[in-house]
Amino acid sequence: MTRICVPVCVSRLSELADAVRAAANVADVIELRLDYLTEVDLSHAGEAIANVLKAVDQQIILTLRPAEYGGARAISAQDRLHFRLQNSGYLKSDRNDLWDLELDLALLLQKRAGEGNDVVGTNLCDWDRTICSYHDFVGVPADLEKIYESMAQTESRILKLAVQADDALDCLSIFQLLDRAQHEGREMIAIAMGQAGVMTRILGPSRGSFLTYGSVDDESATAPGQLTACELRDVYRIDNIDRQTQITGLIGRPVAHSISPHIHNAALAKANFNAVFIPLEVQDVNAFIKRMVRPSSREIDWELRGLSVTAPHKSAVIGGLNWIDAAAREIGAVNTIVVEGDELHGYNTDAIGFITPLKQRQQSLAGLRCAVIGAGGAARAVVWALKAEGAIATVFARDEAKAEMLAQQFGVAYKPLSNATFRDADVVINATPLGTRGKAEHETPATREQLGEVRLAYDLVYNPFETRFLSDARAAGCETIAGLEMLMAQAVEQFKLWTGKHPNVEVMRAAAKRRLGMN
Ligand code: NAP
């Protein structure tokens, strides 16, 4: 059974009932973070809190996290113990409610109980209701196994470890601990926080984690990388993930902005595949390929089917693959990996993704004069695809040396961007990030005046759907192609490579539009 725990973190008693109700709408388990009730005198609030909790059926976890372990209150160990002693009455046995107790306190109690001390017989020693927890908000401690062993020394029913991941590889030790706990018959919650740890939140329950954490909405997330409970259920279909689930995902840095998980998971769900697509923030792509991807050397037992690759790894990943298709080799970039038996195969679906929407508008591209703005990775795929169709490409870039290098490699012309007029172009293509939401959103590589004699403007930027480049182009009388069309077309090819089936494109498009806020 997959449990999603939603933490409730409010500072006033007056906010508590609504927050608990909102959590109850999406949670299997509710964690009440008592330390966040900073406007409340906890020693007198017991009854009021208990009354709020009475109203819900979900299992409750009570947590009074001190500041030194990432909590919102400065509170001594003695006061934490005293509080638990006084307030265990909130817990209901028919709900299997639990206390979260940090490792230092659990060890202290265990010691005092061992000495036949005052705590014996009190609810402080109610180990069946105790989660023994350890948090590291900086990284993955080198002595993780030792910490686990200290936790396992206590009689706590559940052990919880949360560490900070900077690289998807940091998740390996979390998965290995979950395996160990299962092997040793201990219930465990193990999470890697941060964007690089997202896979532990999605795959953890299928690998033995007692629960995973989710928020009510993006604003109320309590830890970096935390997804909403609805995303976990509706986008990642966490209830359906098991050890047979085929894993696909996006490797890059950053990946949090990507809408690919929404597009691919919607298509996988529609096709009823036992498969999931997860964002994987990867720093060192070669180490990642070796330790998590290549079947002969990976340190994780999972059904990895394939990966989508984004910046900055599209070129660097090539050296780690067994076979590269001709287009990807000539472009010098792989954006799709397929695990075939023991081998890793590389493809580039950006080129076909780019050219497909253009060919849907114009049967033959032979002789079409195309101005490609930008000289980065995407421009390479664009120029390669245009050449393959017999179009005449000219590269325009702010860095003339880069434009020249790209142009020479593919045997096309180049010009500086600074004084471009685009008067000789039938099509102008934006292969720069100019216009992207959040950065340079109101900028454009070509103005309405510059586009006056152009027939078609094609933007690779897909977020926002309507960029300034596209609205200027329309105002200048151009036909337009939005970046989302390329994104969809290249995703269709990826889906086919991983599953051998054609995806439902309308479902993919609807998911993309939802994510881009275009309902
Ligand atoms: P990249 O490798 O970083 O290349 C970006 C290019 O844009 C470089 O030539 C860069 O010039 C240029 N550039 C950046 N800022 C500029 C500015 N202010 N003025 C003029 N030129 C500027 O990135 P990429 O991978 O090629 O991606 C480019 C864009 O295409 C991104 O927005 C990406 O999201 C989008 N894309 C979309 C799809 C899709 O499916 N729709 C697929 C792939 C890429 P310098 O080298 O001088 O910095």
Image (cartoon, rainbow, N blue to C red):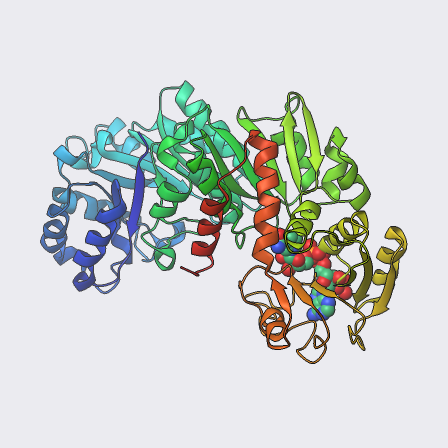
Quarter for ligand 1? bottom right
In the image, residue 363 lies at what x, y percent? 70, 51
**Rendering quarter of residue 103:** top left
Task: Determine the residue located farthest toward the bottom in the rendered image.
Answer: 449
- Looking at the picture, does residue 427 appear above or below residue 191? below
Q: Is residue 103 visible?
A: no
State which quarter of the image contains the N terminus. top left
- 168 sits left or right of 182 in the view: right
In the image, residue 195 lies at what x, y percent? 51, 49
State which quarter of the image contains the C terminus. bottom left
In the image, residue 387 lies at what x, y percent? 81, 51
Q: How many marks?
A: 0
**Rendering quarter of residue 219:** bottom left
In this orientation, which residue lies closer to the viewer: 373 or 226? Answer: 373
In this orientation, which residue lies closer to the viewer: 155 or 373? Answer: 373
- 225 sits left or right of 2 in the view: right
- Looking at the picture, does residue 329 appear above or below residue 35? above
Q: Is residue 207 visible?
A: yes
- 212 sits left or right of 486 in the view: left
Q: Residue at x 15, y 48 (%)?
A: 53
**Rendering quarter of residue 170:** top right
- 73 sits left or right of 317 in the view: left
Q: Residue at x 48, y 43 (%)?
A: 198
In the image, residue 88 lies at what x, y percent? 15, 42
